[in-house]
Each structure stands twice: as C-alpha cells, then as structure tokens.
C-alpha cells in the first residue's frame, strides 16, 4: 500500500523581531517567536528544525543554533548562548543563558542554565485529619449503613463518610 508523502513546510508563519538571521534551509514551525533585543542577535543555521510554539529571546549577546540541531515544541531559550550542531532539545525545555554541546541530547521538560534565581519550594499541604484517626471501614459486602457505626460517635458511617437521616432543605430561589 502506498502512503502519500507529506510536504515539508519551511515557510510557516514565524514572528521575529530585531537582528534575526535564518538560513533558508531551516524549518521553523508555526507559532515560533524569535526576538533579539537591541545589541543582540539570533542566528539559525542550515538544517535546523524548531518545533511549534518555541520561543528564542536573545538578550545581551548572541543566541546561535548551529547546523542540524533539533529543538522540540514549546522550548524556551533566553539570554545568550549556543545550541551545538546536531544537538537535540526535548519539548518544553527551558534554557537560560547557557550553551548546549554538539550532539548533546536534552530530555523533555529540562531546566538548564542560570541557577542564580531562587525557585520557591512547593510544600506539602497540611492535612486536617491525622492518618491514625481515620474511621474504620467495614468491608463486609452484606453490611449496610446502619450495620457500621463508630464507637466514638452516634452517627452512622458508610465507607468512612458520615450519613444522616435528615432531609436537605431546598435552595432558596
């Protein structure tokens, strides 16, 4: 069975600003942003492939992507540095003021570069119910809500949840 070949799209809409130099053989997907601040430059070499939604922002220097490098979708590259020839950058990676060696493979969702900025630690939320005070659950398949009761409470429980015989009042209109 013959399957049709997909045409290469090398002229997709790309937003660029400032001193941006792109080799005609580079393939840049839709939604890519290439922005060079004043006194900065972005250079994209031959055979480079940049995935959709990636952002390159040159700041205070030259940001260069050498020949044959592949950059996945959603990659953020900020500052100055170099992505070496035939390097492969996984999707959703952030590179901050850093360089990647030739032939290096960077896993998806990596964070590379300037560690000078502090990243807030995410703490585990405190639980209001200690683990050792959880109600016991009767796993007998023939039990009902009235069969299981907590010895410390007069309320009935079903699968660890309090049940009540009180009707719920309708919401006011």
Image: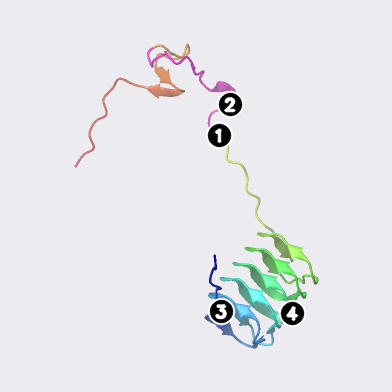
Tell me if residue 142 can be seen: yes
Above or below, 10 against 125 in this view is below
Q: Quadrant of the C terminus?
A: top left
Q: Mark 1 vs mark 4: which is more N-terminal?
A: 4
Above or below, 120 against 138 in this view is below
Above or below, 12 against 102 in this view is below
> Disc number at residue 103?
none
Residue 68 on image: x %, y %: 73, 76
**Element assignment for label 2:** helix
Q: Which residue is located at x 45 percent, y 16 percent?
A: 141
Q: Quadrant of the N terminus?
A: bottom right
Residue depth check, mark 4 versus mark 3: number of the one nearer the observer: 3
The image quadrant that residue 101 belongs to is bottom right
Q: Mark 3 vs mark 1: which is more N-terminal?
A: 3
Residue depth check, mark 1 versus mark 4: number of the one nearer the observer: 4
> Disc number at residue 67?
4
> Disc number at residue 9?
3
| Foreground of the two, 123 or 70 | 70
Residue 142 on image: x %, y %: 42, 13
Q: Mark 4 vs mark 3: which is more N-terminal?
A: 3
Whole-Å distance between the Cαs marked 3 and 1? 52 Å
| Foreground of the two, 157 or 102 | 102
The image quadrant that residue 145 belongs to is top left
**Element assignment for label 4:** loop
Part of the protein shown in magenta: 127-146
- Which residue in the structure is indicated by mark 2? 131
Above or below, 84 against 167 in this view is below
Circles 4 and 3: CB atoms closer than 8 Å: no
Q: Mark 2 vs mark 4: which is more N-terminal?
A: 4
Residue furthest to the left in view is 173
- Which residue in the structure is indicated by mark 1? 127
């Amino acid at each position: 069975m013959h399957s049709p070949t997909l045409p290469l799209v090398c002229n997709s809409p790309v937003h660029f600003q400032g001193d941006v130099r792109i080799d005609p053989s580079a393939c840049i997907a839709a939604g890519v942003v290439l922005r060079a601040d004043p006194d900065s430059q972005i250079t994209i070499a031959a055979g480079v492939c940049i995935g959709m939604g990636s952002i390159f922002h040159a700041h205070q220097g030259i940001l260069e992507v050498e020949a044959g490098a592949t950059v996945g979708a959603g990659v953020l590259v900020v500052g100055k540095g170099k992505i070496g020839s035939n390097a492969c950058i996984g999707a959703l990676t952030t590179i901050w003021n850093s360089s990647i060696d030739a032939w290096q493979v960077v896993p998806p969702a990596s964070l590379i570069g300037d560690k000078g900025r502090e990243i807030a630690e995410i703490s585990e939320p405190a639980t209001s119910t200690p683990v050792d005070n959880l109600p016991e659950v009767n796993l007998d398949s023939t039990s009902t809500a009235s069969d299981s009761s907590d010895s410390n409470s007069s309320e009935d429980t079903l699968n660890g949840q309090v049940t009540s015989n009180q009707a719920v009042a309708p919401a006011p209109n």
